[in-house]
Image: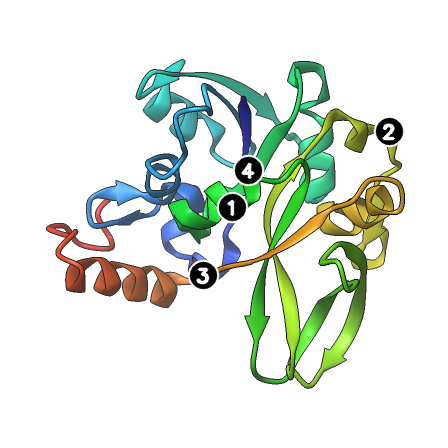
Amino acid sequence: MQAVILAAGYGTRMRPLTYHVPKPMARACGKNLVEHNLEKLPDEINELIIVVGYLAEQVMNHFGNCYNGRRIKYVKQKKRLGTAHAVSLCKPHIRGRFLVMMGDDIYSSEDIRAVLNEERAMLVQRVHSKFSGGKVVFDEEGNLTDIVEGTHNGKDSVINTNLFTLTPEYFNYEMVPIADGKEFGLPQTVVKMARDYPIKIIEATKWKQISDMDDVKDFETELKKAGQCKGFYNQI
């Protein structure tokens, strides 16, 4: 089975570090963010498709053509046109059901397994405070029905984490424009797919969104408390 790793972004909120280092290569406890996620993939994932863009050579030189026994293919996203566009570039390489995940957010092995246990699935995070963005809506059977943009009170709300199990039928759907048409959104496009194919909603037990260097520091602190860290968050 293949896993698509999205690692093409600029990481502007992590400057000045990301002037010289792509965000997915920022380190916590001596390992970059992508490595922390790859370690949690189950054995059935035997090939990685890494979408690179900004400072792509650093990612490609670090991982090479194989990592921990998994073959690697690279797909270059020359223009930052969003997550749906990034996944669309992988279409020629997809052979069957596949996993999609952000390379620079942190997921748990348990949540990855839960998503893979479904034919098609989306991992979500419960939110307990007011937020602006996309609220994930699902039916009584726990299947995705919509994503509603706006400001929400957070009570009983869930948001998308950009971890999916998808099938090749995904590529039959036209990408949905977001950000005033400047990008194309993956979760919004998955909503279109959900009208024809059930997308199971899985609630995350542990997901950490990495937005800035404070998030990296917090992640490293968690690792230290768990006895899994001997390095420093800003090692590159």
Res 51 seen here: no
Q: Is residue 150 left or right of residue 26?
A: right
Q: Residues within 10 Å of mark 1 (few under 14, many from 20)?
A: some
Q: Which residue is mark 3?
A: 205
**Mark-to-mark CA distance, 3 and 2:** 31 Å
| Disc number lying in front (3 or 2) | 3
In which image quadrant can residue 206 be found? bottom left
Which amino acid, mark 4?
Leu
Crowd rating for badge 4 (residues with CA inside 10 Å; few <14, some 14–19, many 20+): many
Identify residue for label 2.
172
Q: Is there CB contact under 8 Å for labels 3 and 2?
A: no
Say which label, 4 or 2, has the lower sequence index: 4
- Kindly indicate the quadrant of the structure image that contains residue 184: top right
Q: Nearer the viewer, mark 2 or mark 1?
A: 1
Work out whether residue 215 or residue 144 is closer to the camera in this orientation and state it: 144
Q: Position of residue 56 (x, y in %)?
A: 48, 29
Under tag 1, what secondary structure? helix
Residue at 78% x, 33% y is 170
Residue at 68% of width from left, 86% of height from top? Answer: 153
What amino acid type is highlighted by mark number 2? Asn
Badge 3 vs badge 1, beta-carbon distance below 8 Å = no
Q: Which mark is residue 63?
A: none
- Residues 158 and 186: in front is 158
